[in-house]
Image: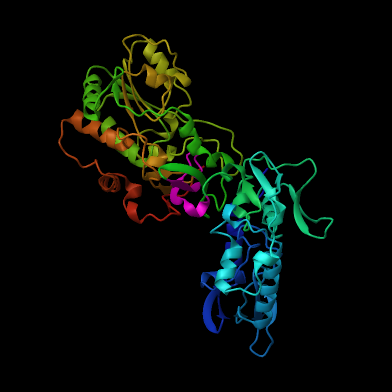
Amino acid sequence: MLRKSSTEINSFQEQMNSSEITIILNGKRIKAQNGERLVEIIQRHDIPLSAPCYHRSLTETGHCGLCLVGARRKATDKFSVVFACTATAKEGMEIDTECEEAVNNRNELFRLHLLRHPLDCSKCDKVGYCFLHKFASQTKFSGFTRIEQGQLQNVKYEEFGQHISFDAQKCIGCQRCVRFCRDILDEELLSFIRNENGFEKIALYPGKNLDNNYSLNLADLCPAGAFVNKDCVYQPVEWDLISTPSISTESSVGINTYVLHRDNKIFRIRPRENKYVNDAWMSNSARNEHKYFENKKRLTRITQNGQRVHLEMAVLQMVKSFLTDELAVVCSGNMSLEDQFVLRKLLDSIVHGMFFLRKRRVSDGFLISDDATPNVNGAILNKIITKEKIVDDLKELNRRIQAGLCKKILSINEDIFSHGVPYALPDDVEIFYIGTENNKTSKRATIIIPVTTVFENTGTFINKDWRLQKFYKAINPPSDNIFPMWYVFSLLSNVYLGTTERELLWLDDVWKNMTHDVDLLANVDFFNVNLSGVLLKKHQK
């Protein structure tokens, strides 16, 4: 399905931009890379220039004409008007973004876009991020009143798929959508045509639709709001929401995301650009991860035998049970690096059997890998498990239970009855559950401790390529009785060891201990890890 990954495109660009050159930009000498697009150079120096049809991960076209600038190779030559999105930098080139001919052409083209564009900004999802607004404010564009000459038409959406619709009135002909389908999805799904009135528009190929798992990237790509995510039609617009950086737990790829929220409610998730992982794209399924927790019945109370108790009492009773029989621990690959580190500290002191579940799914060869667990490499790094001992089911645990070798089971965010353990267990088998949702295991457990989700906590994952990536807390958990998993493990460790030390009850203390104990993290400062992450070691297939 997919032809070009973001890494392939970036690698090609890096090969082109291999040598540094000197050019003149608006009278100033600057450094640039040979073969670099002029639009990238201009935008890097914070000079106002709109280029709505340009995207660094798509093939260039020069359709809209709004990036016209003056350029010449020699001081004796005349400035000629070029498209900044297609023209490339050469040694000694001079660029003038305020060239009179270029400015006049840009303004006239911009006027045409405004005349065709409907006046529905108050309900458009692109409000606050629309290139038309930005261009007009940057250039102080004026010359006519849109209230008199603009369009006040009803929105006429065309259904392009189950999740996305199209408003032809807003289309500016940038063809980002066409190129995304062709360059990234390797499918000819959209075409750019002229209708019966002579206006250009986007149309679906006959018999095609946009029901693939990456269609909603078109709503992100569209600079003028022509493509609309149907789920966002009756939601607050993006500029009115808080954006918090996060990581998708859909698979081991570790798609970078922004969680958009307000008033302790998540409204949507959109991609966060990271050229090392997902470029500017994400799957539709990853956009709906928050709905999974909203639809599932969350655990909100700490209980023992169905009765509500304080966290300290639940921890004390669990530790007392640990002392009587051998403990089997069923571990989830969705735990953060911090969760895993503190758990290992606890397990180092307890005789146990460890079962680390890896969940499988069908890879699409792009942003969904066959490993549906986001932090397997973190567990390997923390020495909770070796790669060879990761399991896909719990048949071995069931064998030990039936043989009478296992009387205590600690399930960490996993439903053991969905992975090979029958619900009809011997009466003397006791289950403890630390997790997020109500399931068969939590119903069978004697002690239940609810914990936070990825949206309610701050921490790190290590993706399949061994890139350490941070996620941040976006919302508060639905109850004051819900704590981070690493905090619960820390209390368990303190009570089990009979220590009063509080060294692992704060996130920065957890990281100080990790950098001391884990060799690959020795030079990593959690608070200075940037949003693109840190590559811990080269990926080994």
Q: From this view, report whether residue 511 is shown above or below residue 450.
A: below
Task: Please report the bounds of the magenta region as a residue range.
Answer: 237-262
The foreground one among 133 and 506 is: 133
Which residue is located at x 61 percent, y 43 percent? 230
What colour scheme governs how the chains and residues are painted in the rendered image of this protein? rainbow
Q: From this view, report whether residue 20 is shown above or below residue 345.
A: below
| Image side of residue 520 versus residue 506, left or right | right
Examine the structure image and report whether residue 241 is included in the region drawn in magenta: yes
- Can residue 36 be seen here? The reply is no
Give how far across and how far down residue 451 sits, in percent.
Answer: 35, 33
| Image side of residue 432 versus residue 29, left or right | left
How many discs appear?
A: 0
The foreground one among 84 and 116 is: 116
Placement of the N terminus among the 4 image quadrants:
top right
Q: From this view, report whether residue 477 is shown above or below residue 139.
A: above
Residue 130 in which image quadrant: bottom right
